[in-house]
Amino acid sequence: MDKEKMININASLLEEPVFSSFEKDGEEVKVANFTLAKKYGGGKEYTKCSVYGEKSEMAREFKKGDLIHVFGYFQGKSQGR
């Protein structure tokens, strides 16, 4: 992944994380999904996040409104996909 897609965000947790799992290569992979909100001027920017494996366990401590720091890779999705 190229460095241009790295993100470093400090934002508030919009809602409690949602936890699930899926199977890959015969093993269960745990997932935590959550949305962050950050104010910019008069508006807000929303960022949907997913963390996998052991990192998903950290999200169990997150509470709505917590200030969360995210550093990782950004993968955009276009609408209709």
Image (cartoon, grey):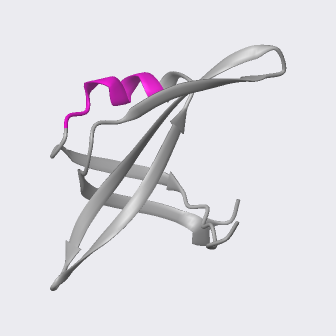
Q: Is residue 30 above or below residue 51?
A: above
Residue 10, how many percent across, how many down? 27, 57
Q: In this view, does 59 lie above or below 1?
A: above
Residue 47, how many percent across, how many down? 40, 61
Residue 61 in the magenta stretch? The answer is yes
Point out the stretch of residues depicted in magenta. Answer: 56-63
Q: Which residue is drawn at 61% across and 61% down?
A: 75
Number of on-image labels: 0
Query: Dividing the picture into quarters, in which one does residue 21 lie?
Result: top right
Residue placed furthest toward the bottom: 42
Q: Which residue is drawn at 53% across and 26% down?
A: 20
Residue 53 in the magenta stretch? The answer is no
Q: Which residue is drawn at 20% across and 34% down?
A: 63
Residue 12, how many percent across, how many down? 21, 53
Q: Which of 50 and 71 is in front in this view?
A: 50
Residue 13, how many percent across, how many down? 25, 48
Q: Is residue 40 above or below residue 37?
A: below
Q: Quadrant of the N terminus?
A: bottom right
Dominant secondary structure of the residues highlighted in magenta in the image = helix
Q: Quadrant of the C terminus?
A: bottom right
Q: Horizontally, is 81 left or right of 41 in the view?
A: right
Residue placed furthest toward the front: 80
Q: Horizontally, is 25 left or right of 71 in the view?
A: right
Query: Dividing the picture into quarters, in which one does residue 9 lie?
Result: bottom left
